[in-house]
Amino acid sequence: MSIDHAGLAVVSGGMIGLALGATGGGGSLLAIPLLVYVLGMKVQPATVLSLMVVAASALIGVYQRRASGEVRVKPALIFSVTGVAGAWGGAFGHRFVREETVLLLFGLLMIVAAWQMWQRSGHVEGRVSDESCAERFPRSCWIKVSLIGAVVGLLTGFFGVGGGFVIVPALVLVLGFPMRMAVSTSLLIIALVAVGGVVGHLQTGQADWPLIGLLLLGSAFGMTGGSWVAHQLSPSVLTKSFAAVAIGVAIVMIIHNGTKLVGGNL
């Protein structure tokens, strides 16, 4: 590995960590493009590395926020049980489904979720309700969390992303979490669910451990900066920033994969 390539790996890891720490999801969106287009990796090994780096970066973020009270462990653990199973299944099915079709539909889903969050951003965020799934867990919360976890797990394993861009909207819109609490809790969920995807992918591939080390070095610094940004911005600004990134990435995904599908059918 050349010095230039090693430097790009550290910078890429820093960008992943920065976005992940600030939004709870942006890092996972950046990981695959950075690994493929900046570091020149093929999609399959890039998917494995993405899951590993995002999981480790998320754990760093959880450790940094351990004293804030914003990480809800019980919902995260329940979310992750079905998420890990879904991630393994998604990783297994990665080889059998045409990615362009799924990515196109997923881009549409991202736009819908991001737009809902943008609209919600104007609401004043108050104290968490005692009836919120962030505080109490009646049967309805168990069912919601388990179903959402399975869906996020499938996406995580299949695409090699942390799934924070789905987890955060789900925690906010479906489970009633405040934005900052959703971002912090999503980091723990991302780390746990990504393990299932890593296990599934490593059954068919190998990991580049030196490259992983460099990416993690960069992500550790990036997570520190991202966590600082998350506490400096208001919930409204953070929500709109998250939504804008998600919509932008979704549009690129739709155009890119739609063009490939149309071209392939001509």
Image (tube, rainbow, N blue to C red):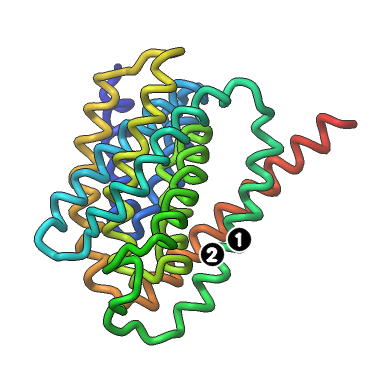
In the rendered image, the quadrant that contains the N terminus is: top left
Which residue is at a point 46% across and 46% down the rendered structure image?
29
Give how far across and how far down residue 99 sits, in percent.
Answer: 65, 32
Query: Does dot 1 land on a helix, a strand or a loop?
Result: helix
Vertical side of 75 occupied by 197: above or below: above
Residue ranking furthest to the left: 67
Q: Amino acid at mark 2?
A: Ala
Q: Nearer the viewer, residue 23 or 135?
A: 135
In the rendered image, the quadrant that contains the C terminus is: top right
Q: Which residue is mark 2?
A: 114
Give how far across and how far down residue 144 sits, in percent.
Answer: 46, 57
Which residue is at a point 33% across and 48% down the rendered structure image?
78
Give how far across and how far down residue 165 sits, in percent.
Answer: 46, 54
Vertical side of 17 occupied by 160: above or below: above
Q: Amino acid at mark 1?
A: Ile
Q: CB of mark 1 within 8 Å of CB of mark 2?
A: yes
Give the CA distance from mark 1 to mark 2: 5 Å
Which residue is at a point 23% across and 73% down the rendered structure image?
232
Q: Which residue is mark 1?
A: 111
Query: Does dot 2 land on a helix, a strand or a loop?
Result: helix
Q: Identify the image quadrant of residue 209.
A: top left
